[in-house]
Amino acid sequence: MSAGLITQEEPIVAQTHAIAHAHSPAPAQVDAAGGWRDYLELTKPRIAVLELVTVALSAFTARWMLPDAALLGWLLSGTALVAAGASAWNQWLEIGTDLRMRRTAERPLPAGRLTPRQVATFGFVTTIAGVALLATQVNPLTAAFGFATWFLYVVVYTPMKRYTSLNTVVGAVAGAMPVLMGWASVEGSLNLSAASLFMIVFLWQFPHFMAIAWIYREQYAKAGLQMLTVVDPSGRRAGAQAVVTALILIPVSLLPSVVDSAGPLYFVWACGLGLAQLACAVRFMSRLDELSARILLRSSVIYLPSLLLMLMLGPYS
């Protein structure tokens, strides 16, 4: 797996093609069309589902009612296509690093079940189709946010991972953009409520990312990805970042109550969830072991959907 690795200074596209050529299986091993399961895996379906849920909940909370069924269908379809395209291009660019990490080495591209050309074609078609669908069937603002999400994730965040730990910040912005897509789809503009929801999803990602970065720090280091746990192997900076963002998230998560888009029950629920996640972050910072990281990861996975579901009750919560 380490044969033919290329230094970070070389262009990432050249690096991708060189490593892909070195590790590609014989033509007989690759299905000319690729299996549908491989294309599904290429879309990172678990992440895509979370994005779709976030988009739908954001659209709902913008008016505290279900959007028009047709509009919601087009919104989710367009978002799913853009998300699929972003995931495909991300893996096309990262075939070299994916080959070096156990957790990603069996993805369709590094494992040789799909070729770089198949992945690039899939990524191009789904991205164009998704943005076009959002522009024509939803509205231009939603399409603009969709393209901005794709651009930040593929063009900025993915290459940044090789050079600076600040990639997490850009990744968190891209991860929170679906909130703006959902809101813009029904309102056509943004307001303070949309901004507060965006900030909740943005901040939530840091404890989540830091837990993952600690668990897989050795694999990230081997792959040459500059996550915070690689830049600072002691883990102190990752732990501090998890605690600080979990702490800031508590008052930010209460903003929907302040702007009258959520009720007192939501206020109490958000406080409880925030304090529980903060406790897990403090435990992680103080212990810096895999168990505390996994507890923080699980708490973050519980936190966001629990908060968003309560937020759906709006002023009645």
Image: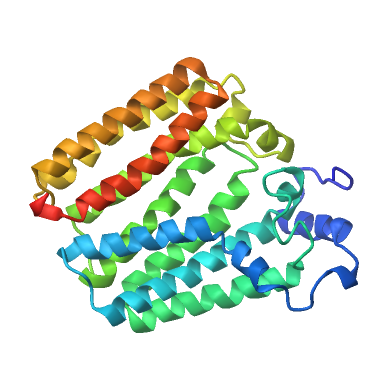
* Apparent side of residue 20 relative to residue 141 in the rendered image (left or right): right
Q: Tell me the quarter of the picture where residue 38 sits.
A: bottom right
Please provide percent x and percent y for residue 117. Answer: 74, 72
Residue visible at 34% across and 70% down in the picture: 142
Residue visible at 42% across and 29% down in the picture: 242
In this orientation, which residue lies closer to the viewer: 130 or 60? 60
Instruction: Identify the coloring.
Output: rainbow
Using the image, determine if residue 215 lies above or below residue 86: above
* Apparent side of residue 67 relative to residue 37 in the rendered image (left or right): left
Q: Tell me the quarter of the picture where residue 110 sits.
A: bottom right
Please provide percent x and percent y for residue 246. Answer: 34, 31
Please provide percent x and percent y for residue 138. Answer: 32, 78
Q: Quadrant of the N terminus?
A: top right
Count of marks placed on residues: 0
* Apparent side of residue 91 relative to residue 50 in the rendered image (left or right): right
Q: Is residue 211 visible?
A: yes
* Apparent side of residue 209 relative to residue 222 in the rendered image (left or right): left
Residue visible at 27% across and 60% down in the picture: 58
Please provide percent x and percent y for residue 290. Answer: 56, 26
Q: Tell me the quarter of the picture where residue 203 sits.
A: top left
Using the image, determine if residue 196 lies above or below residue 67: above
Q: Residue furthest top?
A: 286
Residue visible at 66% across and 75% down in the picture: 121
Q: Is residue 247 visible?
A: no
